[in-house]
């Protein structure tokens, strides 16, 4: 194994969304991650909605969140299944779980159970609302956490409803990535204390944390409560997306004066004929002029025109186009695994580069998978016969 985390052993109790994303990040960086899932894996995309695939390995390639790690099905509802996971945790540095509060404890897999035999274990716990507080036992999704954390109210255009930013802010940025950072911080601390601890990562906390600089702007009076009227929320005409002649879009982010001047020059607009950049009452007039200019060419024509200009202008690419962009190609920013393009591991390391990306290994023989964690083949056979291991 390669990567900066090559010596880290992680047990992941499989779930959906942010916890698998945290485990993916650790695996991308070389950690040896074993994903414990239900014995009957369910696929995110129904079979009938997928293109024809030649084998199971190809099918696994679509499960990008579960890449780079082995997988075994274990029925945690059984005494033997829970006992097996406790044994795996005894040989691990980290255990990650994303159950609602109290569920892991019901399985006998809470921190007290795990620390009784492995006090050095770092237990990363991913929840929506956190492990305490009045909402802790309640269900929720990304949009709910954004709503309550003060984020969602500020996403969207003027006179329009708040706009869901996919599920990137709470689930993945404020959830999975926060959990990965917390786990690694606990691993670093353990190097001096010798003790593990519980990492409580809540999506509602993480979403608010991502808004930290804007809370400062709000307190200073700089940021308005009205969506779509501020510098970075589509309010400023020099920080927005514009439709091109071919119906595609161009992103303009020319905030600083030199870049704004370069933008106007590239668009063929005379600054003397326009309102000044920060004349807010005349922003609609400025927006109209910029939009009219951009509407005269196609997206790719503008991309070529601005390619060598420092104007903070970029074509808006979809997921089918982004991997082929010359900058992405030059940096190997995407990798194709079994025909599925996906983002490469990040960040990058000069001495300990991440290992090559591999698809989810759900078809791997459980005897082989568990054997790498010290479970004898005879025992795996008995557990499979009993329906504990799938």
Image: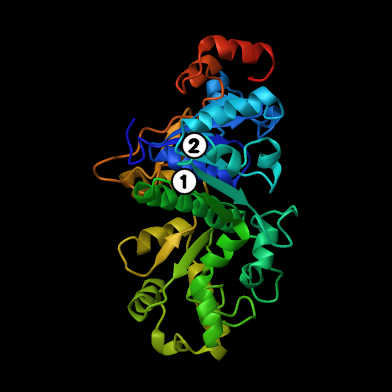
* Residue 214 vertical placement versus 23 (above, below): below
Whole-percent x and y of residue 5? 36, 40
On screen, residue 355 versus residue 100, left or right, reads: left
Whole-percent x and y of residue 34? 50, 30
Residue 51 visible in the picture: no
* Residue 83 vertical placement versus 170 (above, below): above
Dot placed on the residue nearer the N-terminal end, 2 or 1: 2
Instruction: Give the residue drawn at x 40%, y 37%.
Output: 8
Q: Name the foreground residue: 278 vs 232.
A: 232
Name the mark on residue 245.
Answer: none
Which quadrant, please, contains the C terminus? top right
On screen, residue 106 versus residue 216, left or right, reads: right
Whole-percent x and y of residue 16? 63, 41
Secondary structure of the residue carrying tag 2 is loop
Residue carrying label 2: 118
Instruction: Give the residue drawn at x 63%, y 15%.
Output: 383
Name the mark on residue 196.
Answer: 1
Which quadrant, please, contains the N terminus? top left
Whole-percent x and y of residue 156? 63, 69
Q: Name the foreground residue: 113 vs 261.
A: 113
Q: Hey, which quadrant is residue 134 in on the image? A: bottom right
Q: CA distance from mark 2 to mark 1?
A: 8 Å
* Residue 200 vertical placement versus 162 (above, below): above
* Residue 264 vertical placement versus 176 (above, below): below
Q: Are marks 2 and 1 in contact (CB under 8 Å)?
A: yes
């Amino acid at each position: 194994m390669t990567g900066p985390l090559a010596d880290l052993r992680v047990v992941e109790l499989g779930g959906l969304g942010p916890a698998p994303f945290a485990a993916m990040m650790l695996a991308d960086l070389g950690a040896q991650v074993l994903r414990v899932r239900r014995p009957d894996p369910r696929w995110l995309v129904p079979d009938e909605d997928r293109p024809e695939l030649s084998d199971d390995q190809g099918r696994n390639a679509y499960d990008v969140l579960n890449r780079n790690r082995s997988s075994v099905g274990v029925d945690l509802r059984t005494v033997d299944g829970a006992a097996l996971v406790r044994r795996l945790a005894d040989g691990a540095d980290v255990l990650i779980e994303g159950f609602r509060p109290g569920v892991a404890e019901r399985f006998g897999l809470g921190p007290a159970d795990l620390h009784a035999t492995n006090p050095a274990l770092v237990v990363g716990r991913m929840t929506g609302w956190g492990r305490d507080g009045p909402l802790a036992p309640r269900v929720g999704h990304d949009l709910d956490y954004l709503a309550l954390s003060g984020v969602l109210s500020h996403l969207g255009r003027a006179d329009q409803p708040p706009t869901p930013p996919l599920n990137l802010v709470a689930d993945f940025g404020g959830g999975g990535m926060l959990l990965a950072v917390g786990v690694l911080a606990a691993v670093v601390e353990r190097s001096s204390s010798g003790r593990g601890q519980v990492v409580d990562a809540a999506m509602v906390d993480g979403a608010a944390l991502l808004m930290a600089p804007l809370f400062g702007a709000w307190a200073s009076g700089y940021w308005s409560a009205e969506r779509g009227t501020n510098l970075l929320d589509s309010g400023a005409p020099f920080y927005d997306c514009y439709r091109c002649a071919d119906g595609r879009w161009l992103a303009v982010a020319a905030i600083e004066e030199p870049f704004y001047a370069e933008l106007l020059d590239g668009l063929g607009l005379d600054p003397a004929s326009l309102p000044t950049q920060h004349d807010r009452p005349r922003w609609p007039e400025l927006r109209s002029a910029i939009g009219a200019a951009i509407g005269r060419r196609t997206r790719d024509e503008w991309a070529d025109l601005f390619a060598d200009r420092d104007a903070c202008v970029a074509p808006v690419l979809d997921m089918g186009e982004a991997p082929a962009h010359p900058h992405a190609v030059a940096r190997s920013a995407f990798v194709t695994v079994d025909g599925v393009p996906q983002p490469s591991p990040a960040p990058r390391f000069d001495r300990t580069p991440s290992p090559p990306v591999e698809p989810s290994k759900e078809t791997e023989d459980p005897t082989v998978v568990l054997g790498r964690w010290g479970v004898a083949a005879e025992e795996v056979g008995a557990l499979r016969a009993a329906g504990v291991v799938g």
